[in-house]
Amino acid sequence: MGVRTRARVEDLALKGFTAVLGLGRYNRSMAATRMIWAALALLRIAWCLFPQSSYIHPDEFFQSPEVMAGDILDLQAYRPWEFLASFPCRTVFFPLITSGATFWIMSSLTHLGLLRTPITSYSLLVLPRLCFTIFSFLLDYSVYRLAPFWTADRWRAMVLLAGSYVTLVFYTRTFNNVIEGILFAILLMLVSSNAANNSKSRTPLTNKANHSSLIGAILVAGCFNRPTFFAFAFAPVLYWAGKQTGFIFDLKTITINILKLVPSVTSTALIFIATDTVYFNHKAPEDHQSFGINHAEGFIALASKNIVVTPLNFLRYNINPQNLAQHGLHPRITHFAVNGAMLFGILHISATLSIGKVLTKAGSDHQATRPILLLFYFVPLALLSLFPHQEPRHIIPLIVPLVLWSTQQKQAIPWKSAIIPFNLLGALVFGCLHQGGLIPCMSHLEQVIHTKGALEPTHYTLLFTHTYMPPRYLLNLKKQDTSVQVFDLAGRDESQLCKTLAEFVRNVSHGNSPNREARRHSFYVITPGTVKPALNKCGIAFKNETFLFPHLTMEDPPQISTLFSDKWRSQLELYILQLETHA
């Protein structure tokens, strides 16, 4: 063998050895990434069961478990205006198949004697959350399937998804925004799969050539769940309709493909309309009486006369600016400037800074998929920004296209080191601190009522002030139980609060209790530590004080100066103040 030949062989061997080492490092890196995702997945389930103590927004209770607990478990519950039979604005379909199904299983197991432990506030809180948490793994599955099609690093994208506090906190709560995010992820899989089957340059996600029926069903389901789903679906459906034949801007082709959705859209809409019509007519006995007919006949008559289409009612309500003002008005730029950064941190900032550069390079092959993913992210953001009521949870479905874009080939994420501390901080604030004493407070009061009430007949008055709406179903009281009254004073100012409190105390002192069998009347005021000094000025002495830590209320934020003093803890506590009198 000559010198040149031997050198060539050695060079090839060295390159081969280096490649093997590189492959080994890649495999080890991929295995480590898989382990990280698995650990984060276990954390998602464990933190759901722990459970998280925070209370993000009243809708996480009052648009699903609170209503279903009253319907299925016959517990005392507050029915919000969206679920009133006079003008229903929310479909009952998804609450029924999530929280409703969970409570039905609990009730059935209890009646059959298979559930040995009694139903408590813990099971009422955690089991519906666990149902949503399990469904949240459809996001992981969608990213797993979508990543190769969009030239994204599959496991990096899944780690970004699973490690985001949005997934760990928001997607483990009973929000209808969670359902919206899952449906959006499924829609992305369907439109990407169909586009792949009509493109020679992409790897098909499935062998199915056309998903028009499923896409139509998802569109209707999403819009009945939240009519804002149209904002999320607009760009993906337009992409799907144009990609069928490769002419994205051919209006005739797009129109023909959109018309293919009509059969499934119609049939699915009829299912939702029928479900809502039956439910809301059945839950309105006063309407039956107004027709002067018995229950069975009234059900049939009302089903035909009072057809319920909840998305139309939702739109009718929200097009009125005065109605939106009751829920809070925000600048149109809130989603872009505040909510996106608050939820997604550096990923949102990086996408915003890159959009101009990516769109100018959209003609190159390796950049072909980048502007599309950015459109899937920014088009919904822009459409939702047209509405003046903008809350962070409204845009949590956008996490899927964002993590896919952030992990595409040759896509560099600046300030990557900030991702971990950002998500740790978000998980701490939204998973632990925010209104963090209210749910433990409901559990504490449930134990007090069921323990002391069993020993001696007692009437309880629970007055909540400057807290979020208390989920009454967590007190675990049957509807026929009259021993507890709950009052929500919301955020009344100091003078009104003292006046109202004095009136309540006067009634309690005079023994004005609806429960005539009770010899004892226990009166509780629940308020954050930042409001307690105002209560002290009311001149009312309380017998016992119980405090729960931590509790952060941004409606009555703690004083910065006090946080740096030895009284800092009092600013981050929820107080349960008791005044006890004998009737």
Image (cartoon, rainbow, N blue to C red):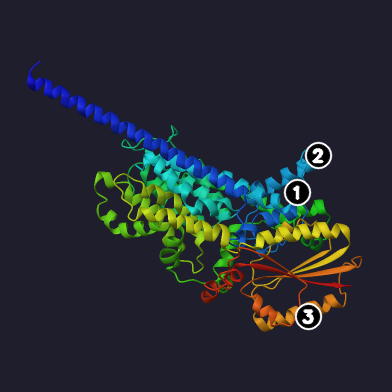
Quadrant of res 159: top left
Asked if one can make out residue 212 in the rendered structure from this viewpoint, the answer is no
Q: Distance between the residues labelled 2 and 1?
A: 12 Å
The reply to whether dot 2 and dot 1 touch (C-beta < 8 Å) is no
Front in this rendered view, residue 35 or 334: 35
**Mark 1 burial class by Cα count in 10 Å: few <14, some 14-19, many 20+:** some
Q: Earlier in the sequence, mark 2 or mark 1?
A: 2
Pointer 1: what residue? 119
Quarter of the image with the N terminus is: top left
| Residue at image coords 46%, 55% | 423
Q: Name the residue under label 2.
A: 113
Instruction: Tell which circle, 1 or 3, labels the residue nearer the N-terminal end.
Output: 1
Type of residue at label 3? Glu
Quadrant of the image containing the C terminus: bottom right
Mark 3 nearby-residue class (10 Å; few <14, some 14–19, many ≥20): few
- Per the image, label 2 sits on a secondary structure element best described as loop
Q: Measured from the top left, where is residue 77 in percent x and y?
A: 73, 60
Mark 2 closeness class: few <14, some 14–19, many ≥20 residues within 10 Å: few
Find numbered disc 3 in the image and state the secondary structure of the residue it sits on.
Answer: helix
Label located before the other in sequence (3 or 2): 2
Label annotation for residue 503: 3
